[in-house]
Image (tube, helix red, strand yellow):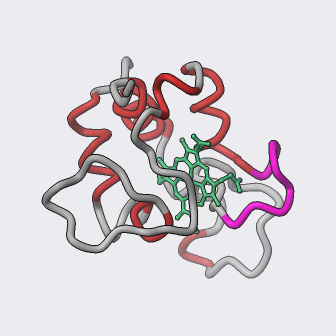
Amino acid sequence: MWGDPARGRAIVANRQVGLCLLCHRGPFPEERFQGNLAPDLQGAGARWSEGQLRLRIVDSGRINPATIMPAYHRSEGLVRVAPAWREKPVLSAQQIEDVVAFLMTLRD
Ligand code: HEC
């Protein structure tokens, strides 16, 4: 299914699900505390193609093995995962598409 930018925005801003704002800041005027460990998400849709964004969310370690950004859709190769979370990616494939669709709207 195609990604839904409104759902994607909610995932990115959510403190339990995406946690993106722990490290990133972005165009979220309603969010008081935003991160400064990572690039501003504003303009991400202009800097990167849809495929490049998807790869960064799914498994950014493929681009930068030393990254602190979590792999949001990878279940293999993780160590010390609690049993309830084994084999379960942080975000579902649909949620990944939603997040990518939202990031594509951040063009300036
Ligand atoms: C623990 C910190 C952390 C979290 C959480 C995190 N990121 Fe990142 N992210 C980074 C860092 C650091 C980079 C810079 C590249 C690198 O070091 O891999 C980055 C890079 C990116 C980029 C490329 C930015 C650019 O324009 O260069 C995008 C897009 C991105 N992250 C989106 C997200 C989204 C969406 C989420 C939540 C689903 C998220 N990140 C969660 C740390 C984080």
Could you tell me which residue is drawn at 57 percent across and 70 percent down? 85
Q: Name the main secondary structure of what is drawn in magenta.
A: loop
Residue 13 coordinates in the image, percent (x, y): 29, 57
Which residue sits furthest front? 108
Q: Residue at x 68, y 77 (%)?
A: 81
Image-quadrant location for residue 5: top left
Region of the chain picked out in magenta, as a range:
61-68
Q: Is residue 22 magenta?
A: no
Residue 18 image point, x, y percent:
41, 59
**Relative to 71, 92 lies left or right:** left
- Nearer to us in this view, 63 or 91: 63
Q: Position of residue 91 (x, y in %)?
A: 48, 50
Image quarter where the N terminus lies is top left
Q: Is residue 6 left or right of residue 43?
A: left
74 over 69 or under it: above or below: above
Estimate the x, y position of residue 11 in percent, counting from the top left.
Answer: 32, 51
Q: Quadrant of residue 53?
A: top right
**Relative to 38, does residue 107 appear above or below in the rendering?**
above
Q: Considering depth in this image, is 84 or 74 the residue closer to the camera?
A: 74
Q: Nearer the viewer, residue 71 or 104?
A: 104
